[in-house]
């Protein structure tokens, strides 16, 4: 799943969602904490799970995404008000995976390691803590691709291969598109940087930190990412609007923004609410310059304070390791399966009308097998915020990249020390 869904439900005080057979005698309740739209995938699995577990009622408590990390970190630190099963987005799994308050799913009685080969490796890697314990198990992933408007490229006399050959070619295509169409190739130059910084990682590295927790933001890939983003800004090919803003959605809807790099789940957003009237005009392509990246992805973890750990593991398996559930979540909610057995399903060969009959799911599937395993770190969100601010200094004020990255490293180290001294263990 991805961030920033349109549905938001306020806080822990919101009425929990419960599913089950009306009038059935309930002897056990499984408490599941989740957030939009991960809750919708869980709700799909509840009826069959409850039928297989007579007397069990699954109760979903849905928090607004913005509130979820703080609520879960606080609950884990206090050891109180904990659910039996806890959802996580890929963006926050690093914050929570190191918590001592989570069960190691590879240990007895869960022994998730026996089934870990059934999910894509890069997603599983992110669910490990620094100590090597498996504390979060993936249920869906977000293999990245380039979504683009085929009609706008045709009007500019461009081919897909020109768009994806290299970042230099990508920018040249953007210049040509702007000259012919008076539009923009990308929403924001930072979209390019986001892809480049996630490529060329060494085994055991995260995006921002080494396995030992050392900041990596002065690595060459950050220099390259900032350079390409700055070049895109100077070329005038970005609309200077951020994803999920009204301006961004309108730009995509009206054809003022011709492409967007995101996970495969974004196709559902385009078709369902961003640009439904542009059916047949959008296409998918590999990311430029032979890059591979992932956006989003969802996990579940079992707190040590769970009252029903064995039942929670059963439900987690029903979500992550049941082919029928994985297929249903994919076709209904665009939640790309983490379970590799599902990838052989014929649904991946189906032409998608919104993409002009393109078999786009094959592209997403192939990308999922080529994404590097990236370790998560509890300070990833902190570092990401610092890097975003640093890139803005380069794009808006022309600051020297090497100086900005050196300052970013100092800021990350300082903020990480503060977080370590004040945050929960």
Image (cartoon, rainbow, N blue to C red):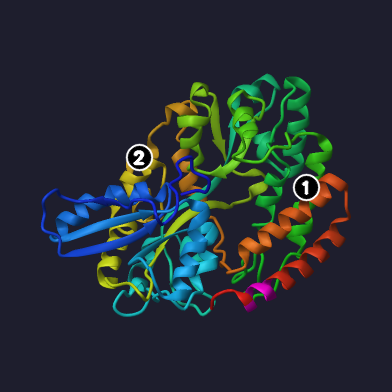
- Taking depth in this image into account, of 285 and 23 the one nearest to the observer is 23
How packed mark 2 is, by other alpha carbons closer than 10 Å (few <14, some 14-19, many 20 or more), is few
- CB contact under 8 Å: marks 2 and 1: no
Q: For this view, does 310 lie left or right of residue 176? A: left
Q: x%, y% of residue 18?
A: 26, 51
Q: Can the viewer see residue 241?
A: yes
Of helix, strand and loop, which one carries label 1?
A: helix
Residue occupying image coordinates x 15% and y 49%: 21
Query: What segment carries the magenta color?
Result: 416-421
Majority SS type along the magenta span: helix
- Give the numbered dot on residue 41: none
Q: Is residue 419 magenta?
A: yes
Secondary element type, mark 2: helix
Does the rendering let one see residue 212? no
Residue 422 rendering spot, x and y as whole percentages: 62, 75
User: Label 1 belongs to which residue?
Assistant: 228
Mark 1: few/some/many CA within 10 Å (<14, 14-19, 20+): many
Depth-wise, is mark 2 or mark 1 nearer the camera? 2
Residue annotated with mark 2: 332
Quarter of the image where one finds residue 186? top right
The residue that appears at 82% across and 51% down in the rendered structure is 393
Q: Position of residue 132 (x, y in %)?
A: 49, 78
Looking at the image, is mark 2 or mark 1 earlier in the sequence? 1
Left or right: 166, with 249 as reference point = right
Left or right: residue 173 compared with residue 394: left
Asked whether 79 or 124 is in front, the reply is 79
Residue 171 drawn above or below residue 208: above
Which residue shows up at 50% across the image and 21% down it?
A: 277
Query: Is 5 inside the magenta-drawn segment?
Result: no
Residue 171 vertical position relative to residue 230 in the rendered view, above or below: above
């Amino acid at each position: 799943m991805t961030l920033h869904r349109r549905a938001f439900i306020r806080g822990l005080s919101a009425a929990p969602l419960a599913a089950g057979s009306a009038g059935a005698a309930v002897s056990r309740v499984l408490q599941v904490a989740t957030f939009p739209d991960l809750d919708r995938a869980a709700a799909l699995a509840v009826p069959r799970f409850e039928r297989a577990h007579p007397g069990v009622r699954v109760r979903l408590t849905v928090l607004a995404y913005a509130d979820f990390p703080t609520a879960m970190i606080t609950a884990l630190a206090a050891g109180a008000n904990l659910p039996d099963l806890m959802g996580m987005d890929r963006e926050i799994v690093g914050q929570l995976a190191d918590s001592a308050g989570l069960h190691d799913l590879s240990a007895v009685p869960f022994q998730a390691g026996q089934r870990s080969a059934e999910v894509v490796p890069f997603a599983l890697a992110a669910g490990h803590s620094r100590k090597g314990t498996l504390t979060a198990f993936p249920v869906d992933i977000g293999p990245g691709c380039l979504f683009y408007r085929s009609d706008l490229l045709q009007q500019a006399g461009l081919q897909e291969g020109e768009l994806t050959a290299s970042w230099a070619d990508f920018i040249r295509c953007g210049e040509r598109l702007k000259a012919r169409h008076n539009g923009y190739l990308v929403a924001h130059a930072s979209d390019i940087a986001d892809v480049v910084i996630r490529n060329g990682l060494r085994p055991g590295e995260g995006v921002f930190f080494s396995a030992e927790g050392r900041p990596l933001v002065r690595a060459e890939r950050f220099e390259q990412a900032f350079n390409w983003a700055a070049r895109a800004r100077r070329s005038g090919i970005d609309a200077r609007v951020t994803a999920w803003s009204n301006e961004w959605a309108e730009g995509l809807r009206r054809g003022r923004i011709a492409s967007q790099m995101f996970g495969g789940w974004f196709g559902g957003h385009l078709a369902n609410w961003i640009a439904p009237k542009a059916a047949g005009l959008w296409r998918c392509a590999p990311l430029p310059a032979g890059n591979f990246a992932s956006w989003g992805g969802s996990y579940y973890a079992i707190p040590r304070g769970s009252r029903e750990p064995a039942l929670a593991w059963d439900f987690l398996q029903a979500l992550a390791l049941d082919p029928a559930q994985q297929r249903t979540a994919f076709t209904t909610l665009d939640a790309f399966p983490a379970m590799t057995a599902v990838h052989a399903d014929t649904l991946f060969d189906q032409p998608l009308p919104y993409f002009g009959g393109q078999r786009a799911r094959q592209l997403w599937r192939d990308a999922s097998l080529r994404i590097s395993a990236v370790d998560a770190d509890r300070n990833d969100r902190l570092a990401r915020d610092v890097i975003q601010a640093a890139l803005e200094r380069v794009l808006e004020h022309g600051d020297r990249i090497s100086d900005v990255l050196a300052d970013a490293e100092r800021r990350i180290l300082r903020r990480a020390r503060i977080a370590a001294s004040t945050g929960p263990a």
